[in-house]
Image: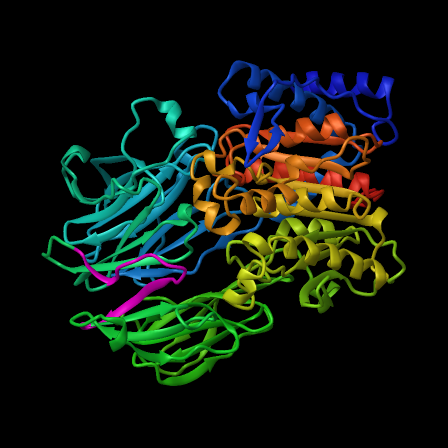
Amino acid sequence: MRIQLSLIAMLTLLTLNCSSQKLKYPTTEKVNQVDNYFGTEVRDDYRWLEDDTAAATAKWVEAQNKVTFAYLEQIPFRNQLKARLTEIYNYPKFSAPFRKGDYFFFYKNDGLQNQSVLYVQKGLDGTPEILLDPNTFSADGTSRLGAFAVSKDAKYAAYGISKGGSDWQTYFVMELATKKNLPDTLSWVKVSGIAWEGDGFYYSRYPEPSDKKELSAKNEFHQVYYHKIGTPQSQDVLVYEDKAHPQRFHYAFTSEDERFTFLSISDRGSGKEGNALYFKRRGEKDFKPIIAEISEFSYNVIDNVGDDLLIVTNHGAPNEKIVRCSANNPDMKNWKTIVPEKPEALQYATTGGGKLFALYMKDVSTRAYVHSLDGGFENEVELPALGTASGFGGEADDKFVFYAFTSFTFPPTIYRYDIQTKQSSVFRKPELKFNPEDYETKHVFFPSKDGTKIPMFLVHKKGIERNGNNPTLMYGYGGFNVSLLPSFSPLNIALLEQGVIYAQVNLRGGNEYGEAWHKAGMRFNKQNVFDDFIAGAEYLIKEGYARSEKLAMKGGSNGGLLVGAVMCQRPDLFKVALPAVGVMDMLRFQKFTIGWNWIAEYGSSEASKEEFENLYRYSPLHNLKEGVSYPATLITTADHDDRVVPAHSFKFAAALQEKHRGENPVLIRIAVKSGHGASSTEKAIEETTDVFAFLLHNLGVKPKFKGN
């Protein structure tokens, strides 16, 4: 195949120069499909591409990939870039350890393993042994270890495996002492944890479909079951279902002492952002309500203290607060606020070692505080720099807990926090060939269209000149209450080495400043997200960091929607656009897999004329214009993406290639045996190589590597 692609690339170069002339794209057949939305007729010329299992779609994918890889192979430094990405990624990576009984567990990747390996050791000073090696799950390394949980007595572990990047998992059970799998096999698992209680656990699944094609169309009637170790799945006990509401999620979890089982119910398909919350004591059959009805507010149990429950909620506290209530009388009027809402957003809260840890974001950087279980403030954890901390959770009797800290030029480092002394110490520090002193990070704020101040991180080599000639990559997300926090990416270092400025924008729609920030970028306020990103680009140009010919944008999933919308609204502003696994058809996203789960964030074209018109105004697929010169575009998606189905990217690519009239290449790269994100290290490096090569080539960067 590589020889064949090389020949295609050579023939292509004989007939055209990819940098200066239009490529010849595959012809995409149109169909006569017109939909009527509240009196407005909308064409859907490429509806047939929604059937990603059809032979015609497979031929289209093959033809598109042939053109794309022919183009990519003619980029002269592509192989050198891949070698550098492989080199810089090749260092041992560890997770923070976690304890159950006498055992400690942690994940490690030696460097280039396709999947991280799960290790176990007895005691913190014990010898680590491989417990589960996902690299042995499949020949191509694309099967992954998903959920993992150990029973309270540390006798068993249950774990999930997903194949080829899919969100579906199959659960298995292992006896820890012997490391041998039991016959237990649980199928059709999705959107589920593993909640141990006694000699079994709760999990969530969907009914087995009569037609396997339904998997690509429907995820309905989510159920909670209890599985007893040593029994077949057919004997699992149905704990909860709701036949009246097929699109609800039902998620069960248990308290550490297993006295309580909690049930969280959400219904985002109806446009509601919050959840209902129920509980039952061990031995009871029926759940009782803590919060009986789903609303816009969220309620999450952190832990229990005897019969008292610790709950995080944004009810009456957009930045969230922590309350304590009795399971004997959980009515909200009896709740006691123990950690009040702060001006900063609560990132999350957890318990460990008999303490309550609350992590906040102050201007997109973590602050970690320690409280007693009744909410009394005890101390702040001193973090090594401005960046992102995660972890701190543990068992009630732990003497110490672990946390990880990272920032843009601070590789993830594991710290041990001693409960008694209140001191942190480095537990494990990565070793890689990278000098953070060569780079600097700036935190700037710029005004959006409506005057709102938007934060943005700029990471680059020290001593750059603000002359407008710096190649610059903007990255954003802006949705679903997700915060883009400072974090280290070894692959991004390869860009920084070539003089690229990396600009990460904290758009409205995320949780950087709490629920108010989120709501300012969702549903009818979604345009704010695009305005924020556009204003960020204009700021970079005004301040002399870059100019349009040196400016690129990148985003994935909801961030792919961001890139698609912005390139439609301001095709003149960016030279390169890199939308990954994007939600591009805002009128039909709710019709695929769990797309209906996003209605709470976006609204629905079927709900009302106002919601249709709002989505239609910015839907990338529907706002491409005939005869416009669009940025050089590389769309990326994958054949096994069952979250944002590849049809979004397929239809957008077909429409873009039809309407684009400039000389910039507009291509789509479709990965195989991969999903909503690369399914293995090998595939991640391959895709990053192609995306970065396309980026640098079209920004006019001629990379310098050792030896040239």
Task: Check the image and report above or below for 527 versus 466.
Answer: above
Q: Position of residue 424 (x, y in %)?
A: 46, 76
- Picture quarter with the C terminus: top right
Using the rendered image of the protein, determine whether residue 603 is visible from the camera's viewpoint. yes
Q: Quadrant of residue 686?
A: top right
Task: Check the image and report above or below for 448 versus 547.
Answer: below
Number of marks in the rendered image? 0
Q: Is residue 657 magenta?
A: no
Closest to the observer, 151 or 321? 321
Residue that sits furthest to the front in the current view: 39
Closest to the observer, 4 or 376? 376
Q: Position of residue 462 (x, y in %)?
A: 79, 65
Q: Is residue 623 left or right of residue 214?
A: right
Q: Is residue 306 magenta?
A: yes
| Magenta span of residues | 287-307
Task: Check the image and report above or below for 159 versus 120.
Answer: above
Closest to the observer, 400 or 152? 152
Using the rendered image of the protein, determine whether residue 679 is visible from the camera's viewpoint. no
Q: Position of residue 251 (x, y in %)?
A: 30, 50
Q: Position of residue 658 (x, y in %)?
A: 73, 25
Q: Quadrant of residue 535?
A: bottom right
By what rule are the colours in the image chosen? rainbow
Task: Check the image and report above or below for 413 versus 138.
Answer: below
Residue drawn at (66%, 23%) of the image: 64
- Picture quarter with the N terminus: top right
Q: Is residue 612 left or right of residue 191?
A: right
